[in-house]
Amino acid sequence: MIDPTAPLPPFPDRLAGRIALVTGGASGLGAAIASRLDAEGAKVIVADIDGDGARHHAATLSQCDHAIMLDVTQPDQWQAAIGQVEQRHGRLDILVNNAGITTMGSIETLDYAALRHELDVDVGGVFLGCQTAIPLMKRTGGSIINMASGSGLKASANLVGYNAAKAAVTLMSKSIALHCAQEKYGIRVNSVHPGAIRTPILDKVLAQVDDPEATLAGFLSVHPIGYLGHPDDIAAIVAWLASDESRFATGAAFSVDGGMTAL
C-alpha cells in the first residue's frame, strides 16, 4: 500500500543550472515546490508577500540565491522582482505562479469586494507574472507553471469566487502557451490542478466555516482515492514540468487531485 505521507525523493541535478522564481514560496505548496526545485539543482528565488517568511524559507535551501518580498497584485513590484533576477542572473528558466488565496462563499454570501480580491490575487497575479517574466524568459526559453486547482475544473456551490478565478487561470494558461508557441519563444506554459492538500491555506479555509470537521469530511468524500494530498505530490509534478522531460507538454492542464475531477 502507498503511504500518502511518505516523502517523494527528488532527482538530483535534473534542474542543475536553472534559475527559478516561485511565488507564494514562504509556506505551504510554494515552500514545498521551492524545496523540490532546489533539491533538483535549480537556483530558486523565493518570492512572497511575507518577506520575512520568504527569507526564512530561502535560508533552508542549498541553492537559493535570494528572497523577494512580492505582492503579486502590484505591477511595479513584479517589474522590480524580474529586474532583480535579470541583474543577478541574466536569465529566468522557470516561473511558478503559485501565490493564491481561497475565499469561501456562494453567489448569495460572497460580497463583491471579496470576489475582486480573489480575482486580483489568483488571476491578476498570474497574468502579471507571465507578462512581466516573458520578455526575460524568451531570451533562452523555459517553463511557466501556473497553479490552478481542481476547483477550476469542477464547481462547488460555496466556492463561486475561487471557481471563477481558477477557471480563468486554466484558460489563460492555454492562451499564453499558444502565444509563446506561435512566437517561437521556447517557453512552455502549463497549469497544475491540485485537489485538497494539507497546507496552511487549507487551515485558513476551514477557519472560515462554522463546522470545520464537517467541511474537512466533505473534502475527503470528493477524493475517491480516500485521502488528501501531500505538498510533495504537487511539488513533484511541478519539478517534472520544469524539466526537459516534459519538453512536449504545453497548454495542458495537469490534474493531481486523487480522482476528484473524475467524479
Image (cartoon, rainbow, N blue to C red):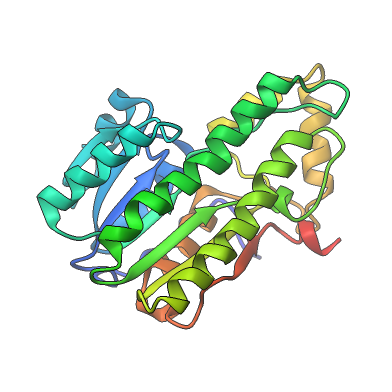
Question: Where residue 228 sits: x, y (%)?
Answer: 68, 47
Question: In the depicted view, which residue is nearer to us: 32 or 182?
Answer: 182
Work out whether 156 lies above or below 186. Answer: above
Work out whether 14 lies above or below 231. Answer: below
Q: Residue at x 31, y 50 (%)?
A: 21
Q: Classify residue 139 by image quadrant.
A: bottom left
Viewer can see residue 39: no
Question: Where residue 25 sits: x, y (%)?
Answer: 38, 40
Viewer can see residue 146: yes
Farthest-out residue, top: 210
Work out whether 248 lies above or below 79. Answer: below
Work out whether 139 lies above or below 192. Answer: below
Q: Residue at x 84, y 46 (%)?
A: 221
Asked whether, in this view, residue 89 is left or right of residue 183, the answer is: left
Q: Pick the quarter of the image with the C terminus.
A: bottom right
Farthest-out residue, bottom: 248
Q: Classify residue 193 by image quadrant.
A: bottom right
Question: In the depicted view, which residue is nearer to us: 252 or 42?
Answer: 252
Asked whether, in this view, residue 261 is left or right of residue 134, the answer is: right
Question: Where residue 115 sits: x, y (%)?
Answer: 69, 28
